[in-house]
Amino acid sequence: MLAYEYFKKVIELLNSTKMEIGFERIKVDNIEKIIFKNNGLPNKNGYIEFEEFFENNLVLRMLDLSNVDLTNVNIIGLDFSGTNIHIDPQTIYNKDMTDVNCYGIKFSPWFCSFNDVILDGCVINDYEAMIDFTKLKSYNENTKVLSEVIDIFGSRSF
């Protein structure tokens, strides 16, 4: 509990600075037991949930998330921008990335399939992400997927 209080104070200080701070990410053993509710076990609805404290993007940016397994984790509405998390769209809960901010997240063009994935309101700016909109389960007008094609006027479009 004391560590939680210290962590909370650090987050409040970072929130008040409103700037990007470069630092080494914190590596935590058994991180899934800390960041997920119920020690990383599925809830009564059959999926794994993030602890509310760890739904904060500034907290997530401070942690080394490179080895976190998101299999059967509900990530709807989470902001992963600026983190080093790996998301496999085929293994997350219900293949649902609704309102997930993936700005700066890398998706392997060989290992990450978006077939039958829900991308409603999702933000993805990885030009290597192989997203075939005809194979998605759904997307909407709020879905932003970067197209690295730059038009003749030099502007980028989502």
Image (spheres, helix red, strand yellow):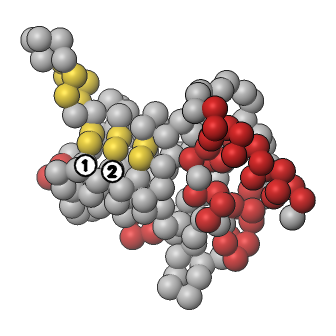
User: Horizontally, is 37 left or right of 133 in the view?
Assistant: right
Q: Amino acid at mark 2?
A: Cys
The residue at 23%/50% (across/down) is: 142
Q: Which residue is mark 1?
A: 143
Q: Amino acid at mark 1?
A: Thr
Cβ atoms under marks 1 and 2 closer than 8 Å: yes
Using the image as rendered, state which of residue 123 and residue 107 is in the foreground: 123
Q: Position of residue 53 (x, y in %)?
A: 66, 60
The residue at 36%/56% (across/down) is: 99
Q: Position of residue 12 (x, y in %)?
A: 69, 46
Q: Position of residue 152 (x, y in %)?
A: 9, 11
Q: In the displayed orientation, state which residue is furthest to the front.
A: 16
The residue at 48%/55% (across/down) is: 78
Residue 120's quadrant in the figure?
A: bottom left
The residue at 53%/76% (across/down) is: 47
Q: Position of residue 140 (x, y in %)?
A: 18, 55
Using the image as rendered, state which of residue 21 and residue 109 is in the foreground: 21
Using the image as rendered, state which of residue 142 and residue 15 is in the foreground: 15
Q: Which residue is mark 2?
A: 122
Q: How far apart in space, not on screen, are marks 1 and 2 (Cα)?
A: 5 Å
The residue carrying pointer 2 sits among few (fewer than 14), some (14 to 19) or many (20 or more) residues within 10 Å by Cα, namely: many
User: Horizontally, is 151 left or right of 118 in the view?
Assistant: left
